[in-house]
């Protein structure tokens, strides 16, 4: 059976860039586009050359893509210009793009309200723009903006808009659910009707996620006959986002109804790059990844319930729809107050602790976890603190730095600036060391007091100098004057390894201190630092 080809069009750098708070630099664009090229997508929409300096510079470079076609985005010509004299169309043609994607209105309501022109003028603008781009020799595709709303309002006119571009030689006609309000059954019905007028091999889908159906709508369009999917990494996009290619690509490969009928130009082995591609975007945006993203999220293959873990240990297919390694992700066994011995055993195995199932230390550790979670600890998201707890119980953690006492003060000076000062009395190999530091808060000051004086800790200075705190969260667990505080700290190092530690206390500084000390201990342990005497 000959499989039909599905083409993947990424618009992270264009439509994704419209996300609130997102502003890609030229360096960001190059890193993302290189990641997409390595993944093997068919089209990379780099932006709108001529619209801003960053996009213009990006399209002036020769990126040397071997898999992807660099695509320039713009709009159909304005009524007051001919296509030949439209400066925006000229900037697209003159850019170093392989293909051009123009958007134009396909909803008569938008034509009259947003553009303020007649339906006939809009059709002429689409037709003349398509003719001009095709005549330039570049591959042309037409984004039919608001198509599904337009079709539901006036199907005859919406189809005329598509034909205006297709009849002039457009390679692709993209059906856009711009407002994101169309549901999967509507997409199926409408795409099935459109195919009666334009071949499916020339149709694409561009779905927005305003009803959280962008991925479902994209798959429904493929089943109905569309052969190009537009989307973004992690579903990045304006309002609620776009269709998430990190979910769509593996579904096309790994779900039988699609894999038996369709093929992609992306190589199967490249699926292992998906998780890395997803997390690169979040790293460049300086935001925490969404743990709950399908396929690539850190929690996508996490198991917490004791019965679930027991079943997963027997056969992962009991609670996993795919092997996480296929998409470059990994299985995670969560330890919490809901954990059973299966969770503990599995978690210990994953961190390299081999222990017999009937070893009394298992029950002791499980009881310790449940007792600690009763008073406010949560090892669900603090794997480093759990590992330290387990290894301390097993006797595997050596002594590194003893912090005998600390003192933190907060002062507001005459200029109104609030400054925190911290002193920490440390001991290494019997030697007492005083460390002092300033910070914008008491925890930052305490952290600086220790880490900015690592030279005094000669034995551990090389191990701690690249330690960096990247996130700090505080949660008040109950109310009143004696409220218990839980502090979570995320740390990282120069190798890009991240770990999470936790501290609980009625005092926020003490809770922070406990989490900070765990972070230091874990860094020294994982880097095999020598024990203190």
Image (cartoon, rainbow, N blue to C red):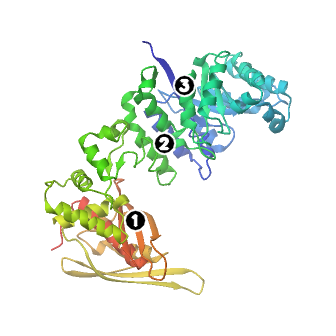
Q: Residue at x 47, y 80 (%)?
A: 420
Residue 442 visible? The answer is yes
Residue 514 place in picture, x, y as percent: 34, 73
Q: In the image, residue 448 lies at what x, y percent?
A: 40, 73
Is disc 3 in contact with disc 1, using a CB cutoff of under 8 Å? no
Can you identify the residue that label 2 sits on?
31
Mark 1, residue position: 489
Q: CA distance from mark 1 to mark 2?
A: 28 Å
Q: Is the N terminus in the top left, top right, bottom left or bottom right quadrant?
A: top left
Q: With respect to residue 289, does 461 lie above or below?
A: below
The image quadrant of residue 231 is top right
Left/right of residue 78 with respect to residue 379 in the rendered view = right
Disc 2 vs disc 3: Cβ atoms closer than 8 Å?
no
Please tell me how crowded label 2 is: few (under 14), some (14-19), or many (20+) other residues with Cα within 10 Å: some
Q: Nearest the camera: 100 or 339?
A: 339
| Image-based side of 149 in relation to 78, left or right | left
- Pick out the residue farthest to the front: 307
Q: CA distance from mark 3 to mark 1?
A: 44 Å
Tag 3's secondary structure?
A: helix
Disc 1: CA contacts within 10 A as few (<14), some (14-19) or many (>=20): many
Give the residue number, with chain letter if any, for mark 3: 222
Instruction: Return the x and y of residue 23 as percentages of the image width and height.
Output: 59, 49
Mark 2 secondary-structure assignment: helix
* Cα separation between marks 2 and 3: 30 Å
**In the image, what residue occupies the spot 80% across and 30% down?**
108
Q: Earlier in the sequence, mark 2 or mark 3?
A: 2
| Residue 515 in view, yes or no | no
User: Is residue 499 depicted above or below 461 in this figure?
Assistant: above
């Amino acid at each position: 059976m000959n499989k039909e080809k599905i083409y993947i069009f990424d618009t992270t750098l264009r439509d994704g860039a419209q996300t609130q708070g997102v502003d890609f630099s030229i360096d960001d664009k190059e890193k993302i586009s290189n990641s997409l090229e390595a993944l093997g997508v068919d089209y990379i929409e780099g932006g709108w050359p001529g619209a801003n300096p960053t996009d213009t510079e990006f399209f002036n470079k020769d990126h040397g893509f071997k898999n992807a076609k660099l695509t320039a985005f713009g709009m159909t010509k304005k009524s007051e210009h001919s296509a030949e004299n439209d400066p925006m169309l000229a900037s697209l043609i003159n850019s170093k793009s392989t293909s051009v994607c123009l958007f134009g209105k396909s909803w008569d309501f938008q034509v009259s309200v947003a553009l303020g022109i007649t339906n006939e003028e809009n059709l002429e603008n689409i037709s003349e723009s398509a003719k001009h781009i095709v005549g330039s020799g570049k591959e042309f595709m037409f984004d039919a903006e608001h198509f599904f709303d337009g079709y539901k309002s006036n199907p005859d006119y919406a189809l005329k808009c598509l034909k205006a571009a297709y009849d002039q030689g457009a390679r692709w006609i993209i059906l856009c659910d711009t407002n994101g309000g169309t549901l999967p059954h509507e997409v199926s019905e409408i795409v099935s009707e459109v195919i009666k007028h334009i071949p499916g091999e020339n149709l694409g889908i561009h779905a927005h996620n305003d009803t959280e159906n962008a991925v479902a709508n994209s798959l429904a369009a493929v089943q109905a006959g569309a052969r190009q999917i537009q989307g973004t990494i992690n579903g990045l996009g304006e309002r609620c986002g776009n269709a998430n290619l990190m979910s769509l690509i593996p579904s096309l490969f790994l779900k039988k109804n699609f894999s038996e009928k369709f093929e992609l130009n992306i190589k199967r082995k490249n699926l292992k790059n998906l998780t890395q591609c997803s997390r690169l975007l979040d790293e460049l945006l300086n935001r925490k990844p969404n743990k709950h993203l399908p396929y690539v999220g850190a929690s996508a293959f996490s198991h917490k319930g004791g019965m679930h873990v027991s079943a997963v240990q027997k056969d992962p297919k009991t609670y996993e729809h795919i092997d996480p390694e296929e998409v470059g992700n990994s299985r995670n066994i969560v330890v919490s107050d809901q954990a059973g011995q299966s969770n503990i055993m599995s978690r210990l195995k994953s961190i390299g602790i081999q222990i017999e199932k009937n070893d009394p230390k298992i029950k002791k550790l499980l009881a310790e976890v449940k007792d600690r979670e009763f008073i406010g600890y949560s090892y669900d998201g603090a794997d480093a603190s759990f590992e330290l707890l387990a290894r301390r119980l097993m006797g595997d953690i050596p002594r590194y730095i003893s912090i005998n006492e600390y003192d933190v003060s907060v002062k507001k000076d005459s200029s109104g600036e609030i400054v925190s000062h911290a002193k920490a009395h440390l001991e290494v190999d019997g030697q007492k060391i005083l460390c002092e530091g300033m910070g914008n808060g008491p925890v930052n000051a305490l952290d600086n007091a220790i880490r900015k004086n690592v030279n005094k800790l000669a034995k551990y200075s090389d191990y701690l100098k690249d330690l960096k705190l990247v996130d700090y969260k505080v949660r008040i667990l109950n109310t009143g004057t004696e409220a218990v505080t839980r502090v979570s700290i995320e740390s990282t190092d120069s190798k890009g390894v991240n770990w999470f530690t936790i501290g609980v206390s009625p005092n926020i500084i003490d809770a922070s201190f406990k989490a900070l000390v765990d972070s230091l201990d874990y860094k020294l342990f994982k880097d095999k630092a020598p024990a203190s005497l």
